Image: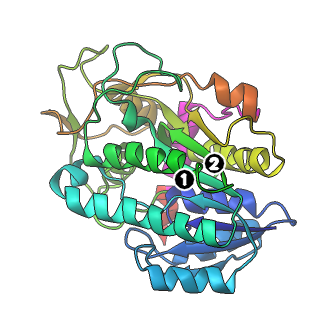
Amino acid sequence: MKILITGITGYIGSHTAIEILKSPKLELIGIDNLSNSNVASLDRIEQISGRKPKFYEIDLCDKEALANVFEKEKDIAGIIHFAALKAVGESVEQPLRYYHNNLESLVNLLTFCKEYKVNNFIFSSSCSLYGNVSQLPVNEDTPLSETESPYAHTKLVGEKILRAFTEEADTKICALRYFNPVGAHESGLNGELPIGKPNNLVPVITQTASGMISKMTVFGTDYPTRDGSCVRDYIHVTDIAEAHVKALNYLVEDDNSDQFEVFNLGSGKGVTVIEAIEAFEKVSGLKLNYELGPPRPGDVAAIYSDSSKAESVLEWVPKRDLENMMSTAWKWQQMLNES
C-alpha cells in the first residue's frame, strides 16, 4: 500500500516516516520543498529505518508539479499532510504568505485526491485553533474561540475546507490537533532542525545550552498561570508519529464512524515555560542563561488537552514523559554539535 507524506523532511514528517517504514507492507512517497528543512533528513530516515522513501522536491502550491507526482504515483492509498508554514510569530508578521502557502497547498492536494480517488487523508492540525479558552482541558467539542494568529486561522480554515470536501468526495479524513511536539528519536539520530533562528521552545533551550544562543527569553511573565509564563501541553514527537500510524490504520480498516473526524493529541498535562526549562536543567545538569521578557503577539496564555477520544477510538496513549522529551532533545543537539 502506497502512502504519501507531504513535508516529509520536516520535524514531525520525518519521525512519522520512520514509524510508517516499520511496516514492510507500506511503500512511502515523500514531498517537500525544503523551505524549512534539509534533504539530509532522508538519510537519517534511512539510517534509522533501513529504508529510504521515494522523494519529490516540489512545492505543493505548484499545481503542475504536483499533478506530475500524482500521474507517476497513481495508486496512492493514503496521504498524511504535514507541509505548512508553522511559526506563530512569523505568521503575524507575514499573514498573506501563510494564507497563500497553507491553504493553496491544501486545495491543490485535495483536487488531486478527488481526481485520483485517494480514499484516506490525515491532516496536520493544531491546538492553536482553540484560541484563548475559558475552560481547561480542551476536548474536541470545546467551542473554538477567536484564533490568535494567521497560522492558527489557516488550520481552522483548513479543517473547514476538509469538512466541506467530504461532501463532494469519498475521501475519509482525520484531522489531528497536536499540542506541542518536542523531543527527538530515541537513537539521537533525528530531531528538530529548523533552518535559521528556531521559533519553538525546546530547540531554543538546547541551542542556548550549547552556546549557539547566548541568552534565551521567556516571553510573558504576568499570564494568569502558576509562575506567570505560558502553559503548554508538551508531547513527544514519536508519540505523535505513532498516532499517525494508528489514525492511518483506523481509516484504512474503515473503522471511522464519520467521514471527517477530529482528534486531540496531547499529554493532558499543562507545563509552564519555566517548568520546561527546569526539566531540561534537571536532565542535562546545566543551568540555562535566560531572561524574562514581554509576551509575544499571537500567543495564548494556557492550553492543554483532553485526549481521551484518541485513547478510546484510536487506542493511542502517549508513552514518554517530559524528562524523556528533554533528554532525547538534548541527545539530538549533542549529536549535531559533534557533527
Between disc 1 and disc 2, whose residue precedes?
1
Camera sees residue 191: no
- Pointers 1 and 2 in contact (C-beta within 8 Å): yes
Separation of marks 1 and 2 at Cα, in angstroms:
10 Å
Tell which of 85 and 242 is nearer to you.
85
Q: How far across and down, in percent of the image, does residue 267 sit? A: 56, 28
Q: Quadrant of residue 61?
A: bottom left
Confirm whether the magenta stretch covers residue 334. Answer: no
Residue type, label 2: Ile
Q: How far across and down, in percent of the image, does residue 221 sit? A: 18, 24
Disc 2, SS: strand
Location of mark 2 (residue): 173
In-image side of 144 versus 245 (left or right): left
Location of mark 1 (residue): 165
Tell which of 305 and 73 is nearer to you.
73
Q: Residues within 10 Å of mark 1 (few under 14, many from 20)?
A: some
User: In which quadrant is the N terminus drawn?
Assistant: bottom right
Residue under the point 24% across and 41% down: 289
Give the residue furthest to the front. 168
Give the residue furthest to the left. 294
Residue under the point 45% across and 22% down: 270
State which region is magenta.
315-332
In-image side of 242 versus 272 (left or right): right
Q: Main secondary structure of the magenta part?
A: helix
Confirm whether the magenta stretch covers residue 326. Answer: yes
Q: Quadrant of residue 227?
A: top left
**296 to 192, vertically: above or below:** above
Residue type, label 1: Phe
Disc 1, SS: helix
